[in-house]
Amino acid sequence: DADVTQTPRNRITKTGKRIMLECSQTKGHDRMYWYRQDPGLGLRLIYYSFDVKDINKGEISDGYSVSRQAQAKFSLSLESAIPNQTALYFCATSDKGKDYNEQFFGPGTRLTVL
Amino acid sequence: DQQVKQNSPSLSVQEGRISILNCDYTNSMFDYFLWYKKYPAEGPTFLISISSIKDKNEDGRFTVFLNKSAKHLSLHIVPSQPGDSAVYFCAATTGGAGNMLTFGGGTRLMVKP
């Protein structure tokens, strides 16, 4: 079984709709992250959470919100989706006990906003 | 402005030959570097890393070289295999488990049989 899972894997929606992407992990890690990938731009950090009560904005948080429902669950919401939020979204986790921030990624969610 | 850059969006090599993927960074505070590999429809997976106190780290067919003065690192794959065909991301961090990764734009490697 995958350690980091994301649902849905693919989603097509319309401008203005509210969308939630979900992430679950069985690695027991405290830290969780949401990234988006765009061609040529690599992965850019949207939000991150170091524990259930600690949520922080990343590089590109505008238009997004998150919820850390439990240590194992971290969801990303687009309150009113717009076409330039069309991208591949990844959830990741890391172990706070490590000296350096090696992250483990889920399989991604491909989101298309029409 | 991107602090980590991979200037070659794609690279094609013949099976058995060496693949060299390059990465440049601008932030002199970065002291740990990672390479991730990504196959289609999968998330990135960690491949190899290097600390700034070293100039080389080797793991099987994969070697990462770091040139701090040039703010440049490279990933060498020898010999290249068709299964190495993937997108490779370079990432950097200022260290400590609490510090974020900054990713490059990725290089798509195609290894031809």
Image: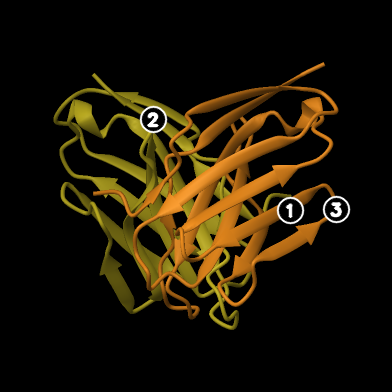
Measured as percent of width and height from the top left, residue B24 is found at 44, 50
Query: Which chain is represented by orange in the image?
Result: B
Label 1 to label 2, Cα distance in Å?
A: 26 Å
**Is residue B66 left or right of B63 when viewed as pictured?**
left
Task: Please state which amino acid type lies under the numbered disc 2.
Answer: Pro
Measured as percent of width and height from the top left, residue A55 is found at 30, 71
Which residue is identified by label 2?
A39
Q: Is residue A61 visible?
A: yes
Residue sitting nearer the eye, A39 or B3: B3
Q: Chain under label 1? A: B
Do marks 1 and 3 share a chain? yes
Q: Chain under label 2? A: A
Q: Is residue A106 above or below residue A92?
A: above
**Is residue B25 left or right of B31 when viewed as pictured?**
left
Q: Residues within 10 Å of mark 3 (few under 14, many from 20)?
A: few
Q: Are marks 1 and 2 in contact (CB under 8 Å)?
A: no
Which residue is identified by label 3?
B60
Q: Is residue B60 above or below residue A31?
A: above
